[in-house]
Image (cartoon, rainbow, N blue to C red):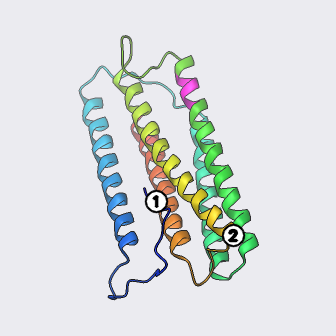
């Protein structure tokens, strides 16, 4: 996502949707389609048999709480920007970054738990159920890294006082994307709990 260089004019002069907002929604739609394909393939492959049943790592519940909390801090950061409370914006963006990093560390521990239980991705001795779990969590983790980069860009912009009530585009796009990542994870977690 190359959104580091935002144009000075944050409003579309033609009265339509801002190009960056349009681009973000296209990215979100493409990610939704990708995960819809993954979860559909998961269900189809599970019905074919030879499916290893195992307990999901407990850390995934902790990660769900972390990402939901990060969504709250991101929303509060946006609200603070609309009120020109730049000090609170910076603090809340840092909290969001910290919670996002903690989520990724949690994912690492979840993978370590899988390996400890001899559940691997691909290769000899692996099972499709484990491989699907690695793919779902790994691809989401990749997108979360892009979200963290986006949050970091907005945080650095806030240090230069480029995020306030008259310049909300950066933080607005970041908030939408971050909420999407949180909602996507919640969907994946519930999906895995129901179908695992």
Residue at image point 62% right, 57% down: 70
Residue designated by label 2: 89
Main secondary structure type of the part rendered in magenta: helix
Please indicate whether residue 39 sits to the left or right of residue 173 in the image: left
Q: Nearer the viewer, residue 65 or 139?
A: 139
Residue designated by label 1: 180
Q: Can you say whether 51 is above or below 155 in the image?
A: above
Q: Can you say whether 37 is above or below 107 in the image?
A: below
The magenta stretch spans residue 123: no
Q: Position of residue 155 (x, y in %)?
A: 64, 62
Range covered by the magenta-colored residues: 110-114
**Circle 2 sits in a helix, a strand or a loop, which is it?**
helix
How crowded is the residue under tag 1: few (<14 C-alpha within 10 Å), some, or many (20+)? Answer: some
Q: Can you say whether 161 is above or below 61 in the image?
A: below
Image quarter hosting the C terminus: top left
What label sits on residue 32 in the rendered view? Answer: none
């Amino acid at each position: 996502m190359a959104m580091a260089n935002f144009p000075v004019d944050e409003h579309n002069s033609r009265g339509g949707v801002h190009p960056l907002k349009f681009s973000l929604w296209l990215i979100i739609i493409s990610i939704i389609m990708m995960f819809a394909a993954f979860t559909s393939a998961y269900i189809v492959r599970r019905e074919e048999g030879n499916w290893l049943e195992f307990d999901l790592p407990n850390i995934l519940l902790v990660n769900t709480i972390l990402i939901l909390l990060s969504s709250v801090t991101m929303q509060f950061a946006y609200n603070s920007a609309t009120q020109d409370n730049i000090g609170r914006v910076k603090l809340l963006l840092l909290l969001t970054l910290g919670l996002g990093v903690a989520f990724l560390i949690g994912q690492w521990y979840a993978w370590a738990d899988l390996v400890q239980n001899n559940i691997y991705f691909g290769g000899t001795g692996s099972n499709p159920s484990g491989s699907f779990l690695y793919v779902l969590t790994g691809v989401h983790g990749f997108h979360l890294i892009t979200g963290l980069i986006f949050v970091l860009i907005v945080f650095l912009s806030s240090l230069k006082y480029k995020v306030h009530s008259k310049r909300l585009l950066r933080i607005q796009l970041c908030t939408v994307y971050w909420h999407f990542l949180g909602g996507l994870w919640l969907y994946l977690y519930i999906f895995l709990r129901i179908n695992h």
